């Protein structure tokens, strides 16, 4: 049997060979440094011409308009984003599958169609779209970072791939993930580690970490990730992009490969990452308008509702009341995160909305509940897959050069280190507990009606996406700020707010620690280490309320941009 | 510890004591016979006066109109239905909790409200509604046939109870179920056995068998059951009423007691039984309009859609195409069921619709899949509850006087006789299988678009509800005709068609049997044994398509009634 290392090395070499020489970066002293912001290199490296720089820096509605008008061809747009994606990859290691010819042929076909018929194929006509590695594209691999799955080619598209292509998208790259997908960072034996574009000593987050880095580098105008505990939102937050975790079943998942398959207790969902809320909305409306329930039986039969988007359930968007959760009662966020919440609060108040405090309840129990569900069968799931090649199950995200865990790991120990599986009956008891927690949280939310002054319960919660901005590789261990919303199945949007500024985001005096983890988190904050890292928040709405969450996200985003303009004017 | 027999006997005696003497039937020779149609006894026994007979024979829209207009008081309507329910109970043993004073006090309160304000409380103002035993009502027991749960009083209403009461309903009785709910008949140690009103040697079906018998006796204008594998539809079909199995989460379930709690793989759902589709529609619209997702986190956020009810997805109801499933490839239905399908086919063709044959696929695998899910933890679930009193887990629905299984049963053996539990990881593999089967069935359905001539896939499937009409107690062993739609989560409505007529529904020559069970089913058919049993069909629509299923049910029902009128005219 070929060793797993050989298979992995061969696949990685094949990937490298797919990068055209003329798109190869000349790595100078600066770009080889780890602790560096590489986000602007695509614009400055000289590989992109002026038009390509313009294209890749365009907003999504602009792109779609120019593509539909034939002003920009899909070939030129796809080429521009492909080049930029390849540059981003050389700087952050964000890609898995690369298929330039195929994508350009598809783009040329769309250009032909538009030229001949004068009509677009659909609302995404000609737009390059990136997909997380697990989303199947016919004829390509979806090894998902498992050496064991290298060389397995999908025999058909996933339902979402079909929907995007029917809408006119040009699927053009697949993006990196951690082995098993069950990490909030991005590293696997096949493709290696993805880094944060704003500071490569920091993680891009995970598991959709490739998407986070790629979109933040403007290497893709629209990416698709998946989220079982924060896997869209953590990379979006760490990389400073927008990212939506839709409710279970709002976006069709059929035809993807996955980890923990059959774990239906709190299922993973697919959702978009983009550099604007317009990208998020365009994706959701396009997918839902395609009536995915006729293609995936688990997709919820619920049409896109303009009524809900117009905030019919939220006073038509006038005089909203947001509740800010400053901490979750387990870990107090680092100073930049608190500052981010303060910026949002001020912007919303200035825009005429109300803001109250959110009093979280039983987050520790919800966090434990989701962990119990995952570990109910995770060890067996991982071991079945990795047994095919004997590749080790990765036990740590700490880079090899710091602690060489991955290669020397005793596989048996790893499985032992994970909770052993439980019985189906025990899992049912966890479900009972989960249902009770969800009922209590709904009541908690409804009970705010008496505090808002709007006659309604709180319209949305503003929450940290993590107790920190992007951390150093191997240090992202606390996903409870995202996981609780998965347990509750709340529709949740990440919105970028600012960047870490070591001169402002200074260390605060120690607070009374909730627990050892809280103390440890306090102690790792050192402003210099986090310089330039994006600061983001989550906007949390109700289950299946994607339309309203997007609309409220637009309101928050607009308020933030208005505040920024005022701030800038003041500084001039 | 008090023996379970003592607890059960005491509870049953208490129930008996709640029946007013003046509502007690004088049992004569006829009514004491088992093989007898008792359905008309309420009208003839002399306990109901003329107005009470008129009230209880009224259609639901009529009732609601007269209640809203104050023409009939809620006290008079509730009294009439209560008397009739008590009569039905004496004939079929359909009730569990009886609370006459409480219901009449509630009715009086509603009458007061209407008189004082001139307005109704809601769309169900003053209407008596019956609930399956498991649906909690504050202050009452929901022992669900478990001796172990006798004496536990609910500390609050279920969400559905609240919604119905807020809509003006008078909850007035609770109805009988089998122990564990996991039988398609109705018998437990506490309340005993429910019989079929049209022939008491036959079962009323289960697990909502009390509702089936009660509604068929017109002892309740609207009842609520639950369905995990056919538990609404089998009693509806066996008793000749309408019954809807909504999709997962369309009707809120929070706050009920249940069996196999935490089994979320193919969850039980609540749904209505009534003597008209108007009753079904009124229930669904009322419940959904109450926005149950703000009260139960598992309720789907999907408003009632008049657009879908007007069949926007089905050519606006003109020229529909139905597909009839004559058998499921496992068991060929008895002659009356086939005749029922033929009646529906002719009626639909006469009404100008198209009818093609449905070719089922992999029903055996879906049937097995649901069984695997139930048994994953059922034995432990049953044993935990029954251990509280040591009551035996019921191992058979065959009446004691035929085979005295229940009392002498060795509990340990029963648990062994059930499949032992499986691991959570094994359950995940079953989920994978289930998802694949659902994907294949969706494709099967979509692929009919080429056969209908309407430009659409088949609008609905017409299927038997069981391979037989109501069978003798203990003989209802084949629930696959309902279970498959639970696995697929299809919205499914039972519609009554006719009654068994031994002179028409004669034995057919043996067919080539699919298997031993098919042969056994053929052999038990003896027209005389089934005389008068209702013949029904299921109308099967898509997931979360309740509005369209109700509308298509109205079309089928109207076609059947028109055919009946023509038939009657021809016979005159």
Image: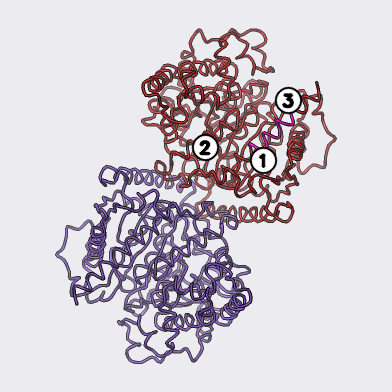
Chain colours: A purple, B red
What element does badge 1 sit on? helix
| Image mark count | 3
Among the two numbered marks 2 and 1 on one chain, the one whose residue lies closer to the N terminus:
2
Disc 2 residue crowd, few under 14, some 14–19, many 20+, Cα 10 Å: many
Q: Quadrant of residue B37?
A: top right
Q: Is residue A508 left or right of residue A322?
A: left
Above or below: residue B450 compared with residue B171: below
Among the two numbered marks 3 and 1 on one chain, the one whose residue lies closer to the N terminus:
1
- Magenta span includes A186: no
Q: Is residue A352 left or right of residue B183?
A: left
What element does badge 3 sit on? helix
Q: Position of residue B217 (x, y in %)?
A: 60, 21
What element does badge 2 sit on? helix
Q: CA distance from mark 3 to mark 1?
A: 19 Å
Q: Which residues are magenta?
A: B554-564
Residue B384, labelled with which disc?
A: none
Mark 3, residue position: B530
Q: Nearer the viewer, residue A525 or A399?
A: A525
Q: CA distance from mark 2 to mark 1?
A: 24 Å
Tell me which chain the residue with mark 2 is part of: B
Q: Nearer the viewer, mark 2 or mark 3?
A: 2
Disc 3 residue crowd, few under 14, some 14–19, many 20+, Cα 10 Å: many
Residue B371 seen in this snapshot = no
Residue B284, labelled with which disc?
A: 2
Q: Is residue B233 left or right of residue A77?
A: right
Mark 1, residue position: B481
Tell me which chain the residue with mark 3 is part of: B
Residue A135 seen in this snapshot = yes
């Amino acid at each position: 049997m070929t060793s797993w290392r050989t298979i992995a090395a061969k696949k990685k070499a094949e990937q490298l060979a797919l990068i055209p020489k003329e798109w190869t970066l000349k790595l100078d002293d600066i770009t080889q440094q780890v602790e560096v912001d590489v986000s602007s290199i695509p614009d400055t490296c000289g590989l992109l011409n002026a038009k390509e720089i313009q294209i890749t820096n365009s907003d999504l509605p602009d792109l779609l308009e120019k593509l539909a008008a034939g002003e920009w061809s899909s070939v030129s747009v796809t080429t521009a984003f492909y080049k930029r994606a390849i540059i981003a990859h050389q700087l952050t290691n964000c890609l898995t599958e690369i298929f330039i010819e195929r994508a350009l042929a598809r783009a040329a076909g769309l250009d032909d169609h538009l030229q001949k018929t004068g009509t677009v194929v659909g609302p995404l006509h000609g737009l390059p779209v990136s997909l997380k590695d697990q989303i199947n594209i016919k004829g390509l691999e979806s090894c998902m970072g498992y050496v064991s799955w290298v060389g397995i080619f999908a025999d058909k598209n996933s339902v979402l791939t079909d929907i995007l292509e029917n809408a006119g998208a040009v699927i053009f790259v697949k993006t990196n993930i951690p082995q098993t997908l069950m990490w909030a960072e991005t590293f696997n034996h096949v493709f290696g580690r993805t880094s944060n574009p704003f500071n490569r000593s920091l993680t891009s987050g995970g598991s959709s970490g490739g998407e986070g880095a790629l979109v933040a580098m403007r290497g893709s105008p629209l990416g698709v990730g998946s989220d079982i505990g924060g896997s869209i939102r953590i990379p979006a937050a760490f990389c400073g992009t927008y990212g939506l975790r839709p409710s279970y079943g709002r976006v069709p998942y059929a035809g993807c490969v996955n980890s923990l398959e059959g774990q239906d207790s709190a299922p993973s969902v697919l959702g978009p990452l983009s550099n604007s809320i317009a990208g998020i909305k365009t994706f959701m409306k396009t997918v839902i308008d395609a009536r995915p329930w006729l293609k995936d039986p688990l997709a919820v039969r619920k049409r896109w509702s303009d009524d809900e988007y117009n905030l019919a359930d939220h006073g038509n968007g006038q005089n909203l009341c947001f509740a800010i959760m400053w901490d979750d009662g387990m870990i107090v966020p680092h100073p930049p995160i608190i500052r981010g919440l303060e910026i949002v609060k001020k912007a919303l108040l200035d825009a005429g909305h109300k803001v109250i405090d959110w009093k979280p309840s039983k987050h520790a129990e919800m966090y434990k509940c989701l962990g119990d569900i995952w570990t109910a069968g995770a060890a067996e799931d991982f071991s079945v897959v990795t047994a095919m090649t004997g590749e080790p199950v990765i036990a740590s995200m700490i880079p090899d050069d710091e602690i060489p865990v991955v290669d020397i790991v005793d596989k048996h120990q790893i499985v032992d280190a994970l909770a052993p599986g439980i019985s189906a009956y025990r899992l049912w008891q966890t479900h009972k507990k989960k249902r009770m927690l969800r009922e209590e949280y709904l009541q908690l939310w409804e009970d705010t009606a008496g505090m808002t002054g709007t006659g309604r319960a709180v319209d949305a919660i503003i929450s940290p996406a993590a107790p920190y901005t992007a951390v150093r590789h191997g240090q992202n261990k606390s996903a409870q700020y995202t996981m609780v919303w998965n347990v509750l199945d709340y529709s949740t949007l990440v919105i970028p707010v600012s960047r870490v500024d070591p001169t402002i985001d200074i260390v605060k005096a120690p607070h009374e620690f909730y627990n050892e983890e809280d103390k440890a988190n306090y102690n790792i904050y050192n402003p210099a280490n986090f310089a330039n890292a994006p600061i983001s928040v989550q906007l949390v709405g109700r289950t299946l309320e994607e339309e309203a969450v997007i609309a409220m996200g637009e309101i928050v985003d607009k308020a933030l941009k208005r505040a920024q303009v005022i701030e800038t004017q003041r500084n001039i």
